Image (spheres, rainbow, N blue to C red):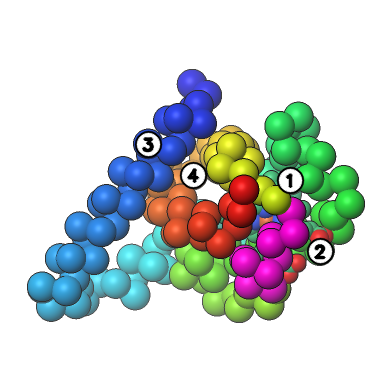
């Protein structure tokens, strides 16, 4: 079933709440001994470097075919964007890569992006993750890491 922008918004809000609750727990309880492994296992659940590379390649194809946001790529260097997204997602999932691109505010500030652009992009990423068999829980964990970037990226 295709998730609508509203479902995505609700999903981000829910994930935010869950994260908040987890952060609260982390502040009151001792640090979980498994946190490094949990991080590494998210990277593994994305299929490691190869899996992430395939997901981003598929994501860029879905994005380029999405009339809601394909125009945003018209003047973009898609190869460079893909390489940076691979680094970024690798790092965010606990992999060994180190993101070498611009910070999210600098990268997007002149684009006048709206909330609906962000949600469309999140949906396209979900389509690519789904296509590559990433488990829902792992998908949501990545979305939860991307959600706080929204206020740096959306300026309209
Ligand atoms: C969580 C959401 C997003 C993430 C993680 C993300 C990530 C990135 C990264 C890593 C870059 C490269 C930065 C650099 O040039 O050094 C970038 C650039 C870019 N992003 Fe995003 N982005 C997000 C949302 C969006 C949205 C919603 C759009 C438009 C619909 C968008 C359009 C672009 C474009 C057009 C570029 C520039 C490509 C170029 O100049 O060649 N991004 N983004």
Left or right: residue 91 compared with residue 13: right
Which of the marked residues, 2 or 3, is nearer the chain's N terminus?
Answer: 3
Mark yes or no: residue 33 visible.
Answer: yes
Viewer-side label of 4, 1:
1
Q: Residue at x 55, y 76 (%)?
A: 96
x and y percent of residue 62 in the render?
71, 36
Q: Relative to residue 43, is residue 60 depicted above or below? A: above
Determine which residue is flagged by label 2. 80
Which of the marked residues, 4 or 1, is nearer the chain's N terminus?
Answer: 1
Instruction: State if disc 4 and disc 2 touch (CB < 8 Å).
Output: no
Give, as a single range, the part of the protein colored magenta: 102-111
Viewer-side label of 2, 4:
2
Determine which residue is flagged by label 1. 60
Alpha-carbon span between mark 2 and mark 4: 24 Å
Determine which residue is flagged by label 4. 134
Residue 129 is drawn in which quadrant? top right
Alpha-carbon span between mark 1 and mark 2: 12 Å
Alpha-carbon span between mark 4 and mark 1: 17 Å
Q: Is mark 2 within 8 Å of ligand 1?
A: yes
Viewer-side label of 3, 1:
3
- Could you say whether the residue bearing mark 1 is in a helix, strand or loop? helix
Left or right: residue 148 compared with residue 112: left
Residue 29 is drawn in which quadrant? bottom left
Labelled disc at residue 10: 3
Left or right: residue 34 compared with residue 114: left
Q: Residues within 10 Å of mark 1 (few under 14, many from 20)?
A: many
Q: Relative to residue 10, is residue 97 depicted above or below? A: below
- Could you say whether the residue bearing mark 4 is in a helix, strand or loop? loop
Alpha-carbon span between mark 4 and mark 3: 21 Å
Figure quarter occupied by ligand 1: bottom right
């Amino acid at each position: 079933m295709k998730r609508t922008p509203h479902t995505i918004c609700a999903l981000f809000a829910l994930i935010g709440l869950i994260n908040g609750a987890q952060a609260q727990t982390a502040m009151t309880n001792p640090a979980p001994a498994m946190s490094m492994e949990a991080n590494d296992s998210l990277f593994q659940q994305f299929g490691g470097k190869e899996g992430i590379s395939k997901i981003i390649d598929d994501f860029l194809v879905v994005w380029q075919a999405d009339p809601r946001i394909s125009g945003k790529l018209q003047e973009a260097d898609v190869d460079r964007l893909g390489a940076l997204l691979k680094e970024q997602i690798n790092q965010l999932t606990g992999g060994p890569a180190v993101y070498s691109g611009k910070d999210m505010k600098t990268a997007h500030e002149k684009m006048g992006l709206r909330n609906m652009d962000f949600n469309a992009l999140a949906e396209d990423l979900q389509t690519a993750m789904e296509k590559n068999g990433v488990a829902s829980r792992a998908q949501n964990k990545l979305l939860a890491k991307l959600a706080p970037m929204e206020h740096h990226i959306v300026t309209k």
